[in-house]
Image (spheres, rainbow, N blue to C red):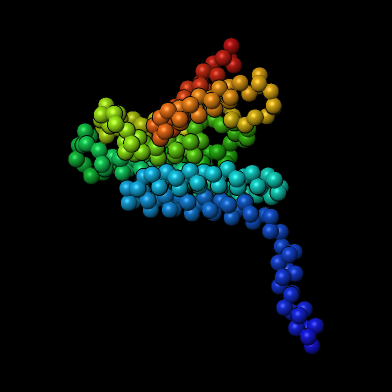
Amino acid sequence: MACYFIRNLLSPLSKFKKMNIKKHIPNLITLINLFCGCVAIVFISKADYEMAFYMVCLGIFFDFFDGFFARLFKVSSPLGLQLDSLADMVTSGVAPGYVMYSLFSESAHELGTNPAIPFLGFIVTLGSCYRLANFNIDTRQTDSFIGLPTPANSLFILSLPLVLQFSDSLILLEILTNQWVLLVITLCSAYVMNAEIPLFSLKFKKFNLKDNALQIVFLAISLALLFLLHFGAIPVIIIFYVLLSIINNLFLKK
């Protein structure tokens, strides 16, 4: 009787062991990314842009590791691919679009007092959505990117209110509170994410200086900018990354 009771008690545990736990780990990490994006949106609604920025950074961190563990455990799946894009849509699509909406709302009314003007900020969200859908079916972007990835664009947008908050430059403050400037940033953001611009990979494929010179120069300059400019370095680094990729592409064509 005791053996029968113990066998029934341990039966669910034996079934649990037989389950392939590894295949669920990447999806769980993806869901944590989604959770971080949801929390970031809550902070944005309260104008706490610093905490929103940190939550988006945390979400992007988990976004990197879901793919890493999927490859490590060899459990990549169509479900994981779709789940990843849906989570990114919140963290790197809705969150930056909401930030642009907020910046438009808080800025001077150069474009008029039409209450619909701030909603132009969600053009960033539309561009992110198209980018993520296109990325899923574009087989050219396995080792490098064509167009700016949504996480990089999200960091760019999320850093703008922090530049406003921590900068002492009156000129910079005037620029970033101008609705025409915000409109240009919004349209350029949506365009660059979907433009046919090859961007160099930050992955180190070979451990030698020659093959990784571009990546090393970029990372060294980026670290120096972060040390000097703090939050203000982030938009500069993203712009520098795109420009450096364009220059690199021109040299490769020659």
The quadrant where residue 71 appears: top right
Residue 130 appears in the rendering? no
Residue at the far front: name it.
Answer: 227
Quarter of the figure that contains the N terminus: bottom right
211 displayed left or right of 48: right
Q: Position of residue 98 (x, y in %)?
A: 36, 45
Quarter of the figure that contains the C terminus: top right
Please determine whether, in this image, residue 54 is positioned above or below residue 212: below
Residue at the far bottom: name it.
Answer: 1
Q: Residue at x 60, y 53 (%)?
A: 27
157 displayed left or right of 71: left
Q: Which residue is drawn at 60% across and 47% down?
A: 66
Q: Where is residue 40 in the image (x, y as percent from the top left)?
A: 42, 49
The quadrant where residue 65 appears: top right
Residue 116 appears in the rendering? yes
The quadrant where residue 185 appears: top left
Picture mark count: 0
214 displayed left or right of 237: right
Q: Which residue is drawn at 55% across and 38% down?
A: 135
Please determine whether, in this image, residue 14 is positioned above or below residue 183: below
Q: Which residue is drawn at 48% across and 43% down?
A: 57
Q: Position of residue 39 (x, y in %)?
A: 43, 53
Residue at the far left: name it.
Answer: 113
Q: Position of residue 78 (x, y in %)?
A: 63, 49
Q: In terms of depth relative to the viewer, which is nearer, 133 or 178?
A: 178
